Amino acid sequence: MDRPANKPKAGSAWSWRLGRLAGVDTYVHLTFVLLVGLVALSSILEGAGLRSTVTGLLFLGALFGSVLFQELGHALAARRFGIGMLDINLRPMGGLARLERMPEDPRRKLWIHLAGPLVNAAIAAAPACHLTLEGTLWPWSSTELSGESLARRLLAANVLLVLFNLVQAFPIDASRVLRALLVRCMPYVRATGIAAA
């Protein structure tokens, strides 16, 4: 998801700066660090071995990497239209990218909002190709995501991220895409109201 902002604000009081990626300041919220600790503790208490615990943590890192790249997709699409990105903040419920402003042209808004889910689709394609070449894409060996290989889990997670961002629930990307389409034939406020409803 992306949000325009009028003035810079470096992350938040509960966020730590990770650095700059593609020229964008990137922060991680404290709750993400707590989530990593919770996953590790849960694995230990369940008696999972070291390998299983490490795989779970690697998957969690890959999942948030996917969210980060999704937000960077928004940032790079905005930059293509001459709009800068203030920062990206990663949280357990997803990422938040703050743009300097949103373009007036509805077509440009459309591409900025579509860029994130398209990045997740591209990420999903990598493990899908790997599993296809291995001949292990189908059938899935388990109905539980936690029992799958790292590649299968990454594929499933990115497909879910794409589907999640297609849900018509404002301000998720699909609703922003809908608003960008509606703005072409009605006032901005009315289009926002319809997308939010």
Image (cartoon, rainbow, N blue to C red):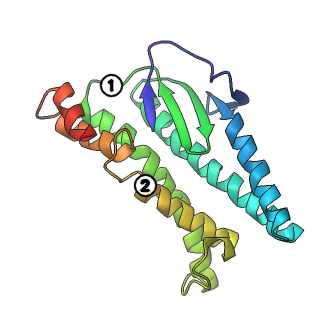
Seen from the viewer's position, the closer of residues 151 and 47 is 47
Between the residue at mark 2 and the residue at mark 1, the CA separation in whole angstroms equals 24 Å
Which residue corresponds to mark 2?
164
Rendered image quadrant of residue 115? top left
Q: Measuring 49% from the left and 34% from the top, which residue is drawn there?
A: 75
Rendered image quadrant of residue 29? top right
Q: Measuring 61% from the left and 82% from the top, which residue is drawn there?
A: 142
Residue 153: give x, y in percent of width and height: 62, 68
Whether residue 143 is situated above or below residue 193 in the rendered picture:
below
- Residue 129: mark in rendering: none
Q: Secondary structure at mark 2?
A: helix
In the picture, which quadrant includes the C terminus? top left
Seen from the viewer's position, the closer of residues 146 and 125 is 146
Whether residue 66 is situated above or below residue 132 in the rendered picture:
above
- Amino acid beneath label 1: Pro
Q: Is residue 50 left or right of residue 184?
A: right
Whether residue 99 is situated above or below residue 59 in the rendered picture:
above
Seen from the viewer's position, the closer of residues 67 and 45 is 45
Which residue corresponds to mark 1?
103
Residue 113: give x, y in percent of width and height: 38, 40
Q: Measuring 32% from the left and 34% from the top, which residue is drawn there?
A: 109
Q: Secondary structure at mark 1?
A: loop
Q: Earlier in the sequence, mark 2 or mark 1?
A: 1
Which residue is most to the right?
Answer: 50
Which residue is most to the front?
Answer: 45
Q: Can residue 72 be seen?
A: no
